[in-house]
Each structure stands twice: as structure tokens, then as C-alpha cells.
Amino acid sequence: MSLYDLRYTHTGLHQAAREGRRAAPARTLRRITSWQWMVLYCKKGSFSAEITAAERRARLQGRLAARRIRALHRAGHGVDDADIPPVRHRHGGLEDAW
């Protein structure tokens, strides 16, 4: 990312003081490299689209796990050890984005 900034230089301040005038700021280019995960790997261009897709995948995985357990129960198998992980909440995705 590139940003332009207005800054006073030491030489510009000293020269303006000698000449008895006000110093003029110089235009400075600053470059920043961002390594945030969502900025680098955001496929759809926005945080909300990525979070919605992740939430949709999590709901689908939960439904598939519940169907597998239901099928085992109907087939007569014990489902005492079956466990469905907690559903991933949308706010968790927002926290992971930052």
C-alpha cells in the first residue's frame, strides 16, 4: 500500500527560519506491506463474504455429522461415543479476520 504524507524536513525548517518565512511541508511517499491473512487470501474481495462462506461450510459439516450419527443409530449401533463439535459462530469468524 502506498501513502503520500506531508512532512517537514530539518533542512527545510532551518532554511525557513534563516529566511524569516514559514516552512513548507514536503510530500513524502510511504510504503506499507500488509501481511494480514484475510487481506492476502480473501478470494471474494470482502471479509463478510469469506465469513459467510466459512459459516456455511461449518453448518454443512455439522449437518453431515448429525446425519452420520442418525444413520448409525438407525442401523443399531451404539452412539454413546458420538460427538458433534460446537457450531462455529459468525462472531468467531469476525475475530479470526482481524
Image: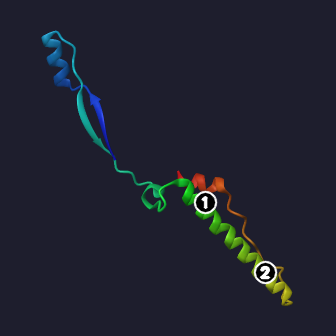
Which amino acid type is shown beneath numbered disc 1?
Thr
Mark linked to residue 79: none
Q: Which residue is mark 2?
A: 69
* Residue 83 in the image: above or below residue 47: below
For the point 76% across and 74% down, which residue is it?
83
Mark linked to residue 52: 1
Position of residue 79 measured from the top left corner of the image (x, y, whole percent): 83, 81
Which amino acid type is shown beneath numbered disc 2?
Ile
In this rendering, position of residue 46 left or right of residue 59: left
In this rendering, position of residue 21 left or right of residue 38: left
Precedes in sequence: disc 2 or disc 1:
1
For the point 65% across and 53% down, which residue is it?
91
Helix, strand or loop for disc 2: helix
For the point 72% across and 69% down, which residue is it?
85
Instruction: Tell me the quarter of the picture where residue 97 sits.
Output: bottom right
Instruction: Tell me the quarter of the picture where residue 52 sits.
Output: bottom right
User: In front: 5, or 11?
Assistant: 5
Instruction: Tell me the quarter of the picture where residue 70 sits.
Output: bottom right
In this rendering, position of residue 65 left or right of residue 78: left
